[in-house]
Image (cartoon, grey):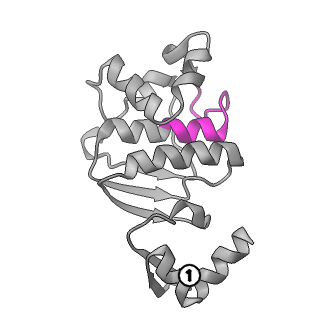
């Protein structure tokens, strides 16, 4: 399964019982400590990890109840960064987090997404403002397509959604 693992960052985060190091390195079992730490730094989670008494050797529970939702999300971003895949699927990657954590996640995602093909499923439109192409789906149909600026200029459904979130 690890060889077929494609980075997919979801709103329902998947961690397993094991150390933080093992969770970040999932799908990349030969990763060095330096590579794991570099991915964690790029994902803005390294400082939190090193503040824990056992650092990267801290044991996580399967449900991850001993860390916050945002910290879980940042760990999955670090995992995806370590894999260096050319394609990503981001499914509501910033849902259920506070504004401060969302800013950290978005910063990490910008680094992660650079130069890659990314499919982003988002209700928070701040997640997709810098996308090269946005498909607006309503009731299962693509009703608009374009960049953020183009879609705002059309003053259609996307613009209504955007202004309702940022008005």
Q: Is residue 63 left or right of residue 146?
A: right
Q: Is residue 156 left or right of residue 91?
A: right
Is 71 part of what is drawn in magenta?
yes
Q: Residue at x 41, y 23 (%)?
A: 37
Above or below, 141 against 119 in this view is below
**What element does badge 1 sit on?**
helix
Q: Residue at x 25, y 24 (%)?
A: 30
Classify residue 95 by image quadrant. bottom right
Q: Is residue 57 left or right of residue 163?
A: left
**x, y percentage for residue 21?**
44, 22
Is 117 part of what is drawn in magenta?
no
**x, y percentage for residue 28?**
29, 32
Q: Residue at x 44, y 76 (%)?
A: 147
Split into 4 quadrants, where in the image is the N terminus? top left
**x, y percentage for residue 151?**
51, 82
Above or below, 118 against 15 in this view is below
**Residue at label 1?**
152
Q: Give the extent of the magenta segment.
A: 60-75
């Amino acid at each position: 399964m690890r060889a077929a693992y494609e980075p997919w960052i979801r709103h329902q985060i998947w961690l397993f019982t094991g150390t933080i190091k093992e969770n970040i390195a999932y799908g990349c079992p030969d990763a060095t400590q330096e590579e794991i730490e570099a991915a964690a730094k790029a994902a803005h989670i390294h400082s939190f990890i090193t503040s824990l008494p056992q650092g990267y050797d801290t044991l996580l529970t399967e449900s991850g109840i001993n860390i916050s939702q945002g910290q879980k999300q940042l760990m999955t971003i670090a995992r995806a960064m370590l894999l260096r895949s050319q394609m990503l699927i981001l499914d509501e990657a910033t849902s259920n987090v506070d504004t401060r954590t969302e800013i950290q996640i978005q910063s990490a995602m910008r680094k992660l997404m650079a130069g890659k093909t990314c499919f982003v499923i988002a209700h928070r439109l701040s997640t997709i403002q810098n996308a090269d192409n946005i498909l607006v789906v309503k009731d299962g149909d693509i009703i608009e397509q374009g960049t953020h600026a183009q879609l705002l200029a059309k003053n259609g459904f996307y613009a209504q959604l955007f202004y309702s979130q940022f008005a």
